[in-house]
Image (tube, helix red, strand yellow):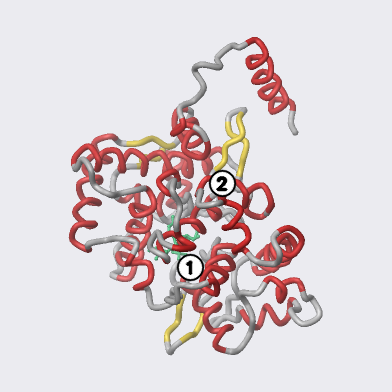
């Protein structure tokens, strides 16, 4: 723990013991990830939100939701997403989101990036992961079983390299880190949760926030927290998208029931900030914009990266509030806005739309 972390905790302890500031404890909405995102937004110097752009974007996001009749049902419509509403699908989503990070290629867009051949198609990005998992299951490999991940006799690194083999000359980015995540998560599930993620769901007892915290507290490779401007900020992108994927897949029923699902925020990755900039919601300072346009890397934990992630979370929260203001009573949350933005940016990319590039931070957090 660094010095200023100790000071902060000591201060909190002192305040509590003196009864100072207790009654102005942060409102429920301001604790957790959303509160941390707002703190980053309030203290950002290289990323800003354009209020006019955000207002206009709220109208177009609402229009897209209406036009597509977008809902949790869309999750299962994706060709590669599992369809069965049972425990095997929960296991699939766990390994999928455990490894759901960093698919962008070091090369420029023309180079042959990592791709997985499956069902006669070449899948890239996030879909390359989903395709590799489905392909492994088709080949009779128990890729969703934690007991397989920890059996280093059978599930060797070489075997995993085969399982995640590429259809191009470029291997899966951060493969060794992914293998490490599988081993670590496998041991944690075996030692603490009877070898199954369903036990974690049971322990969370229908609370999305409890499940996110349980994952961040027990799975170090999911504990997506960083130091920003003298404070620890939590983004917890993969625990949150895991909860969201289960909620959407099961359409809020059975394993997907969470009474507090609306506490889940946007998932700060590298795609949505790009889309929010394209929509005119996010603005970059000239040095940051030129850095991103020239595809230069930004180190994990750098202030620029944390500003991009934190301001994106806060931006989607403002989009959600604006949609609710324009259309009171509508059933919309940060998850559906996020999913829609991701799918839209991928559709636009398919159509060859030119974007300002996404930022390039190599990390296991997203
Ligand atoms: N914020 C957010 N980030 C998302 C997704 C998804 C896919 N979710 C599916 C489930 C429901 C939705 O309808 C989607 O069909 C992947 N990612 C992240 O993007 C990056 C991959 O980008 P690219 O290399 O271009 O595929 C990587 O960090 C990955 O973790 C999302 O939905 N939201």
Residue 314 placement (x, y as % from top left)? 41, 39
Rendered-image quadrant of the C terminus: bottom right
Q: Nearer the viewer, residue 122 or 340?
A: 340
Left or right of 280? Residue 94 is: right
Point out residue 248 in the picture as x, y percentages from the top left corner. 40, 61
Mark 1 CB near ligand 1 (8 Å cut): yes
Quadrant in the picture for residue 96: bottom right
Name the residue at 68% across, 54% down: 219
212 lies left or right of 196: left
Q: Position of residue 265 (x, y in %)?
A: 44, 46
User: Do callouts 2 and 1 mark residues in contact (Cβ within 8 Å)?
Assistant: no
Q: Is residue 221 left or right of residue 168?
A: right
Viewer-nearest residue: 267 or 272: 267
User: What residue is rendered at 45% in x and 27% in y?
Assistant: 27
User: Considering depth in this image, is 256 or 360 the residue closer to the camera?
Assistant: 256
Q: Secondary structure at mark 1?
A: helix
The quadrant of the picture occupied by the N terminus is top right
Residue 259 can be seen, yes or no: yes
Which-is-in-front pick, marks 2 and 1?
2
- Point out which mark residue 98 bears: none
Residue 180 visible in this rendered orientation of the protein:
no
Q: Which residue position is annotated with label 2? A: 210
């Amino acid at each position: 723990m660094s010095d200023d972390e100790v000071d902060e905790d000591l201060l909190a302890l002192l305040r509590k013991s003196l009864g100072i500031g207790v009654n102005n404890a942060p409102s429920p909405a301001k604790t957790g990830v959303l509160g941390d995102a707002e703190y980053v937004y309030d203290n950002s110097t290289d990323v800003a939100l354009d209020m006019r752009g955000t207002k206009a974007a709220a109208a177009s996001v609402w229009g897209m939701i209406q036009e597509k009749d977008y809902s949790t049902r869309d999750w299962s419509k994706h060709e590669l997403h599992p369809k069965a509403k049972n425990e095997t699908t929960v296991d699939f989503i766990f390994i999928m989101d455990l490894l759901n990070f960093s698919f962008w290629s070091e090369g420029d867009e023309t180079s042959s990036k990592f791709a997985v051949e499956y069902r006669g198609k070449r899948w890239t990005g996030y879909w390359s992961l989903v395709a590799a998992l489905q392909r492994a299951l088709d080949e009779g490999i128990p890729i969703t079983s934690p007991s397989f991940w920890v059996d280093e006799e059978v599930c060797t690194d070489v075997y995993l390299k085969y399982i995640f083999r590429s259809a191009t000359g470029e291997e899966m980015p951060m493969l060794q880190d992914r293998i490490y995540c599988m081993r670590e998560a496998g041991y944690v599930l075996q030692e603490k949760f009877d070898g199954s993620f369903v036990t974690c769901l049971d322990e969370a007892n229908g609370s999305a926030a409890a499940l996110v915290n349980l994952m961040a507290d027990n799975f170090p490779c999911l504990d997506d927290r960083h130091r920003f401007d003298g404070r620890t900020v939590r983004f917890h992108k993969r625990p949150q998208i895991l909860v969201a994927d289960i909620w959407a897949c099961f359409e809020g029923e059975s394993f997907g029931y969470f009474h507090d699902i609306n506490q889940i925020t946007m998932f700060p990755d590298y795609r949505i900030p790009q889309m929010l900039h394209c929509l005119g919601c996010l603005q970059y300072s000239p040095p940051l914009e030129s850095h991103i346009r020239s595809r230069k890397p930004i180190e994990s934990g750098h202030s620029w990266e944390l500003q991009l992630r934190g301001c994106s979370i806060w931006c989607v929260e403002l989009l959600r509030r604006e949609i609710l203001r324009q259309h009171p009573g509508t059933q919309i949350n940060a998850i559906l806005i996020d999913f829609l933005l991701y799918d839209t940016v991928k559709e636009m990319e398919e159509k060859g739309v030119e974007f300002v590039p996404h930022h390039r931070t190599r990390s296991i957090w997203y």
